[in-house]
Image: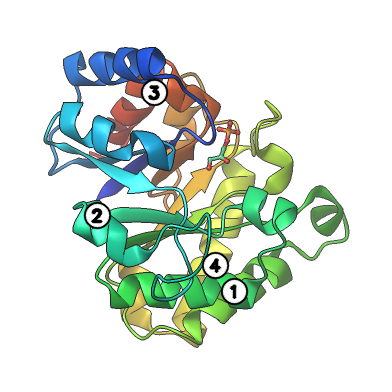
Amino acid sequence: MGRKFFVGGNWKCNGTTEQVKKIVGTLNEAKVPGEDIVEVVVSPPFVFLSFVKALLRSDFHVAAQNCWVHKGGAYTGEVSAEMLVNLDIPWVILGHSERRALLKESSEFVADKVAYALSQNLKVIACIGETLEQREAGTTLAVVSEQTKAIAAKISNWDNVVLAYEPVWAIGTGKVATPAQAQEVHADLRKWIHDNVSAEVASTVRIIYGGSVNGANSKELAGQADVDGFLVGGASLKPEFIDIINAATVKN
Ligand SMILES: O=C(CO)COP(=O)(O)O
């Protein structure tokens, strides 16, 4: 099938110049499989993007954590897709659950952002995931397929999209999804994409898992057939991020 393993590090709203230097230093010295085996992307806050890009080894790439929904202009506090392109930032994370919950970003708004970012040739890590209440109510697939459907309605080319399944109850809680739970949702999502987008996109799109991934649990999760990588929060700020990148070897 040839879906290249993908590991993203979402630093969220963390870091000082000194911490950033230290993290990048650790990444630059790390021994990891080549770019043919694993694609590695780290996502610092906007203010550190250029700094990280300049320091970071050339086989790792950077992502912004958000961008404005349309062309830039009179939108105080926002950063446009055009600016990211201008700075040679190849990736952007969109629709993270923290933004959906705290900043009330709807599925439609996220989908508009995804479509606009793709139109500017950015590559997108699009995040979806259910809350604990939704899981307990048995609506996990309905929720993640609704979030995916909103995106599918607005884009026609999935080549530059990575779908990040991040159950909200697993984010920052230390309560990781079991490999079986992750695999079940990933397989259901792939089937949904098969039935509602195309067989081709279903077989090629990477679906990565996020939520309390760490050095210890990453190998077993990576062993699941439909888990094509990770979006890592807390552990991406620590040296164990290297172990998570190395979980890619499980696929080979
Ligand atoms: O939200 C996440 C990545 O985007 C996951 O965060 P944690 O790895 O800290 O649970």
* Residue that label 2 marks: 90
**Sequence-first disc among 2 and 1:** 2
The reply, left or right, for residue 197 in relation to residue 106 is left
Q: Amino acid at mark 2?
A: Pro
Q: Secondary structure at mark 2?
A: loop
* Ligand 1 found in image quarter: top right
Crowd band around label 3 with a 10 angstrom C-alpha radius: few (<14), some (14–19), many (20+)? many
Mark 4 vs mark 3: in front: 3
Residue underneath mark 4: 189
Within 10 angstroms of label 2, few (less than 14), some, or many (20 or more) residues? some
Q: Hey, what amino acid is under mark 1?
A: Phe
Residue 109 is tagged as 1
At 33% across and 72% down in the image, what residue appears?
118
Q: Marks 2 and 3: in contact by CB < 8 Å?
A: no
Which image quadrant: the N terminus?
Answer: bottom left
**Amino acid type assigned to the residue bearing label 4 in the image:** Leu
Sequence-earlier tag: 4 or 1: 1
For disc 3, the marked residue is 241
Nearer to the camera, 72 or 227: 72
Label 3: which secondary element: helix
Give the alpha-carbon distance from disc 1 to disc 3, as whole Å.
Answer: 31 Å
Earlier in the chain: of badge 4 and badge 2, it is 2
Q: Are marks 1 and 3 in contact (CB under 8 Å)?
A: no
